[in-house]
Image (spheres, rainbow, N blue to C red):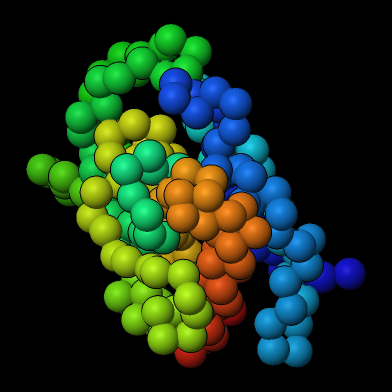
Amino acid sequence: MPEKIVIVTGFGPFAGHEERNASWEAVNLLPDVFPFGKQSYELRKFNVPVAYDEVDRIVPHIWSLKPTLVVHVGVHGSIDTINLEQCSYTSGYCRSDFAKRCLPCDKITLHGKSAGVDGCTKLTTNLNTELIAKELNLETNVKCCCSTEVGNYLCGYIYLKSLDVDPDRTLFIHVPKVNEPYSSEQTMAAVYNVVGKCLEQLAAEKKL
């Protein structure tokens, strides 16, 4: 039985994606075990409702499991690439979630290492997204890009919450809608490959 854990999350339905969310469609297809080197990692998948209170509940639970890596996945209706998000922002969360609830304040209070930094406007992953995108574009037929526009909705919110816990082991991936242009199987494979690249970086930095 694998002793180490990789966690990948996708989102449930929300406005414009009521019938299917491409992120969960892909994440749900991932295998339950991720072989890496001489080890096998348990790959746990979470379907996250598009609601702020659900993110507040799920993110602490995820990190309580002491995962080696956490990859959040969300759908973006206006892209045709796999976007690796480099950062998330601390303010601008004004939209109501799928449960029609809003946050009490659009500025997110941080609790991690950046909690006491005045004027902290964003948190950034320490994973090298540019290297991952470059390698995957050479090795696969799925176009991968880097982005700094995770948005100020649930995607940005869950990313910020996890980056606040551990920026070394957190990444967010935006994926396009199903079959625009990639099938769920192709998107799943892209997410799988990104997980592998993240583990390679953590191994090289002796963080596994």
At a point 68% along the width and 82% down the height, the residue shown is 36
Residue 168, picture quadrant: bottom left
Looking at the figure, which quarter contains the C terminus?
bottom right
Q: State whether residue 96 is above or below residue 137.
A: above
The image quadrant where one finds the N terminus is bottom right
123 sits to left or right of 178: left
On screen, residue 24 above or below 169: above
Q: Residue at x 37, y 75 (%)?
A: 133
Image check: 177 left or right of 110?
Answer: right
Asked which quadrant contains residue 59, the reply is: top right
Please tell me in which quadrant of the rendered image residue 156 appears.
top left
Q: Position of residue 71 (x, y in %)?
A: 52, 57
Task: Identify which residue, 184 or 108, lies in the foreground.
Answer: 184
Of all residues, the one furthest to the right in this rendering is 1
Q: Nearer the viewer, residue 59 or 177?
A: 177
Image point 48% across, 76% down: which residue? 141
The answer, for residue 72, to whether it is visible in the render is no
Position of 187 with respect to 44 (left or right) is left
View extreme (left): residue: 119
Residue 4 horizontal/vertical position (percent): 72, 69
The spot of residue 148 in percent (x, y) is 23, 55
Position of 56 relative to 1 (above/below): above
Residue 152 percent location from the top left of the image: 28, 34
Most foreground residue, 16 or 194: 16
Residue under the image location 59 percent in, 63 percent down:
186
Towards the viewer: 58 or 15: 15
Residue 189 at least partly seen = yes
Q: Disc count in the image?
A: 0
Judged from this view, the residue extending furthest toward the top is 100
